[in-house]
Image (cartoon, rainbow, N blue to C red):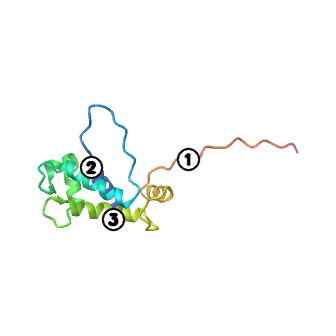
Amino acid sequence: MKTFALAAAAIAGLAAAPVPAQPVAAPAPPSTRAEVEQRIAQRFALRDTNHDGFLVSDELGDSAAMAIAQLDSDHDGKISLAETSRAMLAMFDSIDTDRDGTVSPAEKAAAEARIGQPQPQPQPGPEPQATPD
């Protein structure tokens, strides 16, 4: 569970992109494995400023140490697209419990509950009326 949360935090830092001048609506989170793969490649390309196929501390910013510690499986001090993909797709696969390649709302809620994020609470219904005895 702790590893799952740390990997999520590392990946969130990896996925951060420069802030645009105008506010932009946040893109919907990917819900299919194909969408995740596409988003990984796009975000990796944005971060790989020298286009060498690796992310290093300078390209990772404040979360560099944590990202490298979590994702650098060959311990060469840099993160490849394959290392990034492997980690993020493993996280996707852990959420996609029925292995259909899509994260349903129920699977998303279950994953959020596992990492301790609060779930939206149902709105209370009307108060029951007292019945005369």
Local packing at callout 1 (Cα closer than 10 Å; few below 14, some 14-19, many 20+) is few
Q: Name the residue under label 2.
A: 13
- Name the N-terminal-most of marks 1 and 2: 2
Disc 1 residue type (three-letter): Gln
- Disc 3 target residue: 90
Dot 1: what SS?
loop
User: Residue 107 placed where, x, y %?
Assistant: 47, 60
Q: Where is residue 78 in the image (x, y as percent from the top left)?
A: 15, 58
Q: How many marks?
A: 3
Distance in Å between CA atoms under marks 3 and 1: 29 Å
Q: In which quarter of the image is the C terminus?
A: top right
Pointers 3 and 2 in contact (C-beta within 8 Å): no
10 sits left or right of 64 in the view: right
Q: Separation of disc 3 and disc 2 at Cα?
A: 17 Å
Residue with the most extreme top position: 22
- Is 113 drawn above or below residue 19 in the view shown? below
Looking at the picture, tell me which residue is in the foreground, 105 or 72.
Answer: 105
Residue 67 location (% of width, % of height):
23, 55
The quadrant in which residue 129 appears is top right
Report the amino acid beneath label 2: Gly
